[in-house]
Image (cartoon, rainbow, N blue to C red):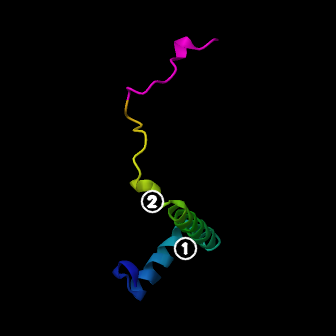
Amino acid sequence: MPFDVGPWELVILIGVLALLFGPQGVPDVARRLGRAVREAKEAVGDVDPRRMLEPGPDPDDRTQTTPDRRDRAA
């Protein structure tokens, strides 16, 4: 089992969830958790590891030329 959780711990966890959210709320919580895990997996899959190795502009570098708000026409 992941995180070294045994069957009794799962039973206790499901019981606590049922007490907190009610019997109708547990499937909704599980559905939201599954959706969040799925979205996280998709986000990780969308990252191109080759782009992570390429040097790019440093967002903290203040020396780059950016237009000043005062220079813009109102």
- Judge from the rendering whether residue 62 lies leftward or rightward of residue 33; answer left or right: left
Q: Is residue 67 magenta?
A: yes
Query: Are there few (<14), some (14-19), or many (20+) residues within 10 Å of tag 1?
Result: some
Extreme-left residue of the structure: 4
Q: Magenta region's main secondary structure? A: loop
Callout 1 secondary element: helix
User: Mark 2 belongs to which amino acid?
Assistant: Arg
Residue on which the image places disc 2 = 50
Q: Is residue 72 magenta?
A: yes
Give the position of the C terminus as an image quadrant.
Answer: top right
Residue drawn at point x = 53 percent, y = 67 percent? 41
The magenta span reads: 62-74
Q: Which mark is residue 39?
A: none
Extreme-bottom residue of the structure: 7
Q: Which mark is residue 18?
A: 1
- Judge from the rendering whether residue 72 lies leftward or rightward of residue 64; answer left or right: right
Distance between mark 1 and mark 2 Cα atoms: 45 Å
